Amino acid sequence: MQRCKDCQAYQFYPRTICSHCGGRDVAWSAVSGRGVIKSFTIVRRGISRAYEAPYVLALINLEEGPCMMSSLVDVDPETVVVGARVTVSFESWSTDIEMPVFKVAQEG
């Protein structure tokens, strides 16, 4: 994720300037991959054959601060709740593209 070298704030989506202080010195930084479900919806009618319904789209409050929209995977849609802890995983969309998705974190 991008982080401003001036104010140390993380930002998502990527930009050329810091969305917090306007600084121009932003760089890629490793992050925890953890977050909490802020909101979600269950999509019951996929937009194409590539998206088999039902599936869950969620807003994830990342541990570092920014909020990110992503898919929840490997979960029964009917069991998803706001406030659940999640961890990042990655799905291959092609040989060149990996997309971040999230899984509900295991308790314990």
Image: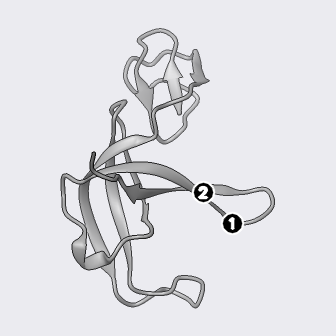
Residue 51 spot, x, y in % from top left: 53, 82
Q: Give me the C-alpha separation between circle 2 and circle 1.
A: 7 Å
Q: Secondary structure at mark 1?
A: loop
- Of all residues, the one furthest to the left in this rendering is 82
Residue at 45%, 33% in the rendered image: 32
Q: What residue sits right under mark 1 in the picture?
A: 93
Residue at 81%, 61% in the rendered image: 95
Residue 102 spot, x, y in % from top left: 44, 56
- Of all residues, the one furthest to the front in this rendering is 108
For residue 10, side relative to residue 83 (left or right): right
Q: Residues within 10 Å of mark 1 (few under 14, many from 20)?
A: few
Which labelled disc corresponds to residue 69?
none
Q: As displayed, is residue 104 above or below residue 67?
A: below
Residue at 53%, 33% in the rendered image: 1
For residue 20, side relative to residue 26 (left or right): left
Tag 2: residue type? Met
Residue 15 spot, x, y in % from top left: 55, 34
Q: Residue 24's image quarter?
A: top right
Residue at 34%, 43% in the rendered image: 35
| Residue closer to the observer: 21 or 44 | 44
Residue 48 spot, x, y in % from top left: 55, 88
Which labelled disc corresponds to residue 99?
2
Q: Answer yes or no: do the residues labelled 2 and 1 have beta carbons within 8 Å?
A: yes
For residue 96, side relative to residue 63 (left or right): right
Tag 1: residue type? Trp
Q: Secondary structure at mark 2?
A: strand
